[in-house]
Image (tube, helix red, strand yellow):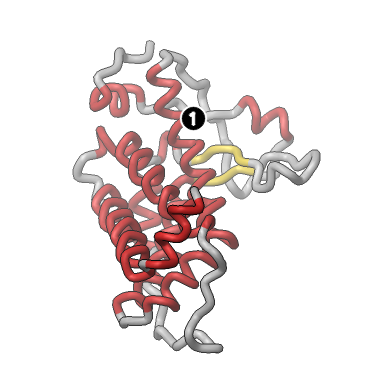
Amino acid sequence: MSDATLNAVKDHPDDFAVQISDQIESFLVAVAEVAKGDEPDSAVPFLLLEVSQLLLAGGRLGAHEDIVPDERYEPDLGPEPDVDDLRQKLATLLEPIDVYSEVFDPYEPRKAPVACRISDDLADVMADLRHGMAHYRAGRTTEALWWWQFSYFSNWGSTASGALRALQSLVAHVRLNQPLDDLDGLDTDEDLAEEALAEAAGKVMAEEIAGPLGLRTVK
């Protein structure tokens, strides 16, 4: 972000807050719609687009100077919204390709990949974003921006980035006509060796992904 852009953010904080909240609201609505399962054929490319757009908002929050909340202690928001139903719907929708392998910190040497789920990632991101949105809708704009920025660094930024890599890889395998091997037993509860994780993958839902993208079917 250029100095001029950063200055514009500082000079017009209300505009910045509205833009960030709009991007986050768009993601929350879009993922909830995908989770309904009404259009399973386009779920993966649509999620790829939505997560990519969300991470633009995250990048803007990350480049912004530290946002300090108005109050010393975070106001009580009451019970957190339940995301388990959304998590389960996404898991069912993405079941053939939900599990993927991820390295959490690329700067931690010799760290073995672990198994993750796209459905878990998206549900966790939704929980973080909804928490901030509750502040925003209550008129606590600075509190909302502080929470979104803090949780971007501490959780949802890296979580969304992992999901994005998995989604991008799925679409790339279809576009490049490179089908994945069977996923035989890979699960997030298993302690698998690095080589097994590197080789394990789920069969891409070729027909579901390739059709909406106008791509050839993977043999």
- Disc 1 target residue: 202
Image quadrant in which you'd find residue 126: bottom left
The answer to whether residue 194 is seen in the rendering is yes
Out of 95 and 125, give the one closest to the viewer. 125
Q: Is residue 54 above or below residue 75?
A: above
* 78 left or right of 26 in image: right
| Quarter of the picture holding the C terminus | top left
Callout 1 secondary element: loop
Out of 114 and 141, give the one closest to the viewer. 141
Q: Position of residue 43 (x, y in %)?
A: 30, 39
Residue furthest out toward the right: 110
Q: Position of residue 8 (x, y in %)?
A: 40, 60
Report the residue at 30% width, 39% height from top: 46
Out of 76 and 72, give the one closest to the viewer. 72
Image quadrant in which you'd find residue 167: top left
Report the residue at 29% width, 60% height from top: 22
> Which amino acid type is shown beneath numbered disc 1?
Gly
The answer to whether residue 124 is seen in the rendering is no
Q: Position of residue 195 (x, y in %)?
A: 71, 28
Q: Is residue 176 above or below residue 195?
A: above
- Disc count in the image? 1
* 155 left or right of 132 in image: right
Report the residue at 43% width, 77% height from top: 142
Q: Position of residue 209 (x, y in %)?
A: 31, 27
